[in-house]
Image (cartoon, grey):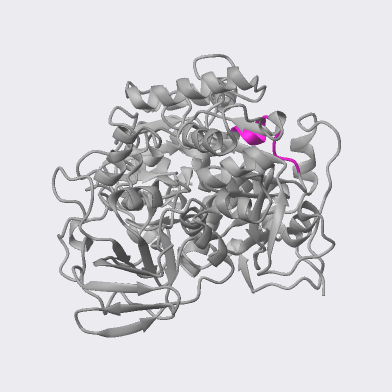
Amino acid sequence: MNNKITGRAYVLGDNIDTDQIIPAEHLVYSTSDPEELKNYGRFALSGVPPVEAGLPEGKKPFIKENGFTSEFSVIIGGSNFGCGSSREHAPLALMVAGVKAVIAESYARIFYRNSVDGGFVIPFETPVKLNNVFKTGDEVEVDFENNTITNLNSKKTYSLNSLGSVYDIVKAGGIFSYARNTGMLAR
Amino acid sequence: MGMTITEKILAKSAGKSRLTPGENVWLNVDVLMTHDVCGPPTIEIWKKEFGSEAKIWDKDKLVIFPDHYIFTENVHANRNVEMLRKFAREQELKNYYDPGTERYKGVCHIALAEEGFNVPGTVLFGTDSHTCTSGAFGMFSTGVGNTDAAFIMGTGKIWEKVPESIKFTFNGKMPEYLTAKDLILHILGDIGTDGATYCAMEFDGEAIESLSMYERMTLTNMAIETGAISGIIAVDKVTEEYLEGKVRGGYEVFRSDSDAKYLKTYSYDVSKLKPVVAQPHSPDKRALAGEVSGTKVTKCYIGSCTGGKITDFRFAARILSGKKVKLPTYIVPGSTSVAKMLTEETYDGATLKEIFLKAGCMIAPPSCAACLGGPSDTFGRSVDGDVVVSTTNRNFPGRMGSKNAGVYLASALTVAATAVKGSLADPAECM
């Protein structure tokens, strides 16, 4: 994995639940058929109420009409990101849409695990809320050797919590690669 | 230092004598459960990772209950059930419960209990966040995603961070207008939707002991709504009676030590608690039913793993008996055995089903139905600016279908009282 991710930020509020990330009616698509899979990108974050979509102004769709991928590759949320259901389709949908990392003050357990074990997006926790200092559209750089996020527009840098005990799984790209690297599963 | 019931069960599963919260351990899984939404992608990942000739770690420990999108014309949803059917045939799975046959059971978390998969002292994982429901049986149970489930399917193992525990003690006698749903909504109002993130919630006290297994399952079911990894209630006489004849062989009973360490403890006197609702759009937006009485409502819904058990329908029948509903009222039994019980159990000389039909309710066959919205032809799905009062578990924006709708979460007593009154009601008013 690269040590840095650069891209445009998409800012959301607290308690972004999995129904907002990918509404349940879309969970019928195959996750292995490449054509059907695109629908997860198309409907990613489609359940976020418009006024809360793309803060601080809102009403900034994550996916443009008839699009399948997003111009934003870093999500900046608040607390309890990914609460709700166990659907792995949530981090999958963000990945299919082109998201590389999520930055949030805290996560719900299953979304966090799914992101890490499935190798979909990297979930970074932050010591303080950052969704009130970044704006949707800001150019950002995430550096996960130094655990920082920099706003390339304002040149301000903020700390991220270390990935801690899941670092090795994130680095391996998911639980299966990790288990093969460590000899737990045959290669 | 003593250990909590959760630490003891996880230690046994990890093959260790003791565990400390915060440490990562590899667990040996006793049962893996999946359904029609997460089963197909789990199987795809399993095949990709372990090869087309892969073997399930233990065929008898994989349980598949299609339950989410069953009664729909949606081609993708039906394709997914067909995929599970084919997989069960290929792998000769004995624990597959096929829709359209007599084996079909309905909502997985209720069916797990009914079919004897909830065994005290064991560890159960499922591809559904409400898998925590099974914790009512003195066991560890929690939800995971498809990748983790595929890993378990191939190895029987999964890593987990040992959680800290938070204890909730309920003292006193339950008033007739109060249910387990009110208890968990009170907790949510107090600690919020991330108040127990990654913790195990442990419930005890004389009020808990007075609850049936189904009511206990309502409490543990909504543990996930606080962010908890699991909810747990130790085995007692009520558990033992429920399990008689359901579980082959014995089971191990664990209890927390008196000096076990808790992150926090909460204590409630249930005799002082009043019926509550969670207002749109979060399960922790608590209000007393009495405070919001009279609020405009367009639909009533009784169903789901949370509020579609026989006990919920007994509550509803107490209020709906001899009355007419003033709002469209949707009834979805959680399982085929609950549906059967509606035709057998009586209240005031009529079966529960007769009471509901006479009152003007609509009844659908068992499934998850509109609890999570589902395909556009789902029974009871919210449309436009509906205001739904529901016995289900989540009321996030768009949860029951329409993005413009609002959902009030409540007990079956509160939903039934609302249906009769025509606007949001406090069940204590009509008892």
Q: Is residue A83 above or below residue A85?
A: below
Seen as rendered, the residue at the extreme top is B101
Residue located 45% across and 63% down the image = B193
Q: Which residues are magenta?
A: B111-119
Residue located 32% across and 32% down the image = B375
Question: Residue B205 appears in which quarter of the rendering?
Answer: bottom right
Q: Is residue A74 left or right of residue B131?
A: left
Q: Is residue A160 above or below residue B244?
A: below
Nearer the observer, A10 or B226? A10
Report x, y in % for residue A37. Answer: 33, 38
Report x, y in % for residue A115. Answer: 46, 56
Is B114 part of what is drawn in magenta? yes
Report x, y in % for residue B424. Answer: 33, 49
- Callout count: 0
Q: Is residue B92 left or right of residue A55?
A: right
Q: Is residue A20 left or right of residue B258?
A: left
Q: Quadrant of the N terminus of chain B?
A: bottom right
Question: Residue B214 appears in which quarter of the rendering?
Answer: top right
Residue located 73% across and 69% down the image = B20
Nearer the observer, B352 or B161? B161
Nearer the observer, A153 or A64? A153
Is A63 part of what is drawn in magenta? no
Q: Is residue B135 left or right of residue A103?
A: right
Q: Is residue A43 above or below residue B310?
A: below
- Tell me, yes or no, if residue B70 can be seen here: no
Nearer the observer, B14 or B358? B14
